[in-house]
């Protein structure tokens, strides 16, 4: 008898048995002992791909749907082995003897010979394929450190974008009694979104702006589907999970009193009780340089503590609980 992890597919000539545990997902980071991505101590898995393209994204390497090369110039010793190894002639030398990468070629490269020959790790590969079985083995190794309230968190990028892989992985986690949290954009067709929620215990979901036009300017998509999905999940009576709407506070873009109040009113109207506000930071700025891109927020200062507290007060005036930053007070 086949276990639930296996599936038989009818072929005209034969029956093919597929081990779903061998499905592969693209992941750009895995962090153990995380305390910022849900209750307790957790293992956080960062999945590649995202339906949004936020102009301040702190994980730009996670936007790729394939492994991508990162170049750290400070580590380069100018041995030029990568130039000889590159089959696409994507690397040339500047007048100061530093390297120039043609990112139009590097970003779609599938072989990454330059990474293989770089002994000083100036060229690194972001993104690795894991099977479901490999991740479940990792979770079983880590669960002794989670305690009674921890578990697995899926972040990104957008963790739910790799549909077949994630849905099967979520099912395996539930079967293994693993507490699952996700940090999601909620930007999916509603049927799929709600199906995944059957296997998720804790949801962080961003509301980046309440105005659909401004939301599209900031992220590349409007917020209609996002708000529908959040409201639909909040109304699901047979779901016992917990929802935390998040607002990333980007000074001058979405931190007006009007936007914060409108967001709080929406959250209260759909029956939720908590909002988490996250101050902008520049920790991902170096990644843009490593990807050969310009980070337009390099000179942007984070919001002051006073400003964050004033926004917190606006939300609390609407009758909601608000907490600031990544600490989870639950």
Image: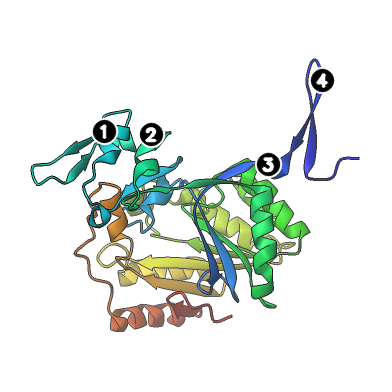
Give the Cα distance between marks 4 and 2.
36 Å
- The residue mark sitting in front, 1 or 3, is 1
Work out whether residue 318 can be spotted: no
Labelled disc at residue 22: 3
The disc, 1 or 3, on the residue closer to the chain's N-terminal end is 3
Q: Secondary structure at mark 2?
A: loop
Total label count? Answer: 4
Asked if residue 271 is positioned above or below residue 183 in the image, the reply reads below
> According to the image, label 2 marks what residue?
109
Give the Cα distance between marks 3 and 4.
20 Å
Q: Secondary structure at mark 1?
A: loop
The reply to whether callout 4 and callout 2 are in contact (CB within 8 Å) is no
Q: Where's the C terminus, which quadrant?
A: bottom right
Mark 1: give few (<14), some (14-19) or many (20+) Cα within 10 Å. Answer: some
Q: Quadrant of residue 233?
A: bottom right
Q: Secondary structure at mark 4?
A: loop
The reply to whether callout 4 and callout 1 are in contact (CB within 8 Å) is no
> According to the image, label 1 marks what residue?
90
User: Along the horizontal axis of the image, is 215 left or right of 151?
Assistant: left
Asked if residue 249 is positioned above or below residue 311 in the image, the reply reads above
Give the Cα distance between marks 1 and 3.
34 Å
- Could you tell me which residue is drawn at 43 percent across and 50 percent down? 62
Where residue 217 appears, x then y in whole percent? 31, 49
């Amino acid at each position: 008898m086949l276990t639930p992890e296996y599936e038989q597919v009818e072929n005209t000539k034969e029956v093919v048995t597929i081990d779903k545990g061998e499905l592969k997902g693209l992941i750009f980071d895995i962090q153990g002992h995380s305390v910022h991505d849900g209750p307790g101590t957790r293992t956080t898995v960062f999945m590649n791909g995202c339906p949004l393209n936020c102009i301040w994204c702190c994980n730009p390497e996670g936007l790729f749907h394939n492994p991508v090369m990162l170049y750290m110039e400070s580590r380069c010793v100018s041995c030029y082995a990568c130039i000889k190894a590159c089959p696409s002639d994507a690397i040339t030398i500047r007048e100061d003897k530093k390297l120039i990468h043609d990112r139009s070629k590097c970003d779609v490269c599938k072989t990454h010979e330059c990474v293989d020959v770089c002994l000083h790790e100036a060229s690194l590969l972001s993104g690795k394929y894991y099977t479901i079985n490999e991740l479940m083995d990792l979770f079983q190794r880590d669960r002794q450190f989670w305690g009674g309230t921890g578990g697995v968190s899926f972040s990104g990028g957008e963790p739910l974008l790799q549909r077949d892989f994630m849905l099967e992985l979520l099912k395996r986690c539930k079967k293994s009694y693993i507490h699952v949290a996700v940090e999601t954009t909620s930007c999916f067709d509603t049927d799929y979104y709600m199906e995944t929620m059957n296997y998720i215990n804790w949801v962080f979901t961003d509301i980046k702006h309440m105005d659909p036009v401004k939301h599209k300017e900031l992220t590349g998509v409007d917020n209609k589907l996002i708000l529908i999905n959040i409201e639909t999940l909040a109304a699901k009576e047979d779901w016992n999970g917990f929802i935390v709407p998040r607002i990333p506070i980007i000074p001058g873009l979405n931190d007006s009193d009007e936007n914060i109040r409108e967001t709080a009113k929406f959250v209260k109207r759909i029956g939720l009780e908590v909002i988490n506000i996250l101050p902008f930071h520049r920790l991902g700025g170096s990644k843009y340089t490593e990807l050969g891109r310009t980070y337009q927020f390099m000179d942007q200062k984070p919001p002051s503590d006073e400003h964050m507290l004033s926004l917190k007060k606006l939300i609390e005036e609407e009758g909601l609980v608000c907490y600031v930053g990544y600490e989870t007070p639950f």
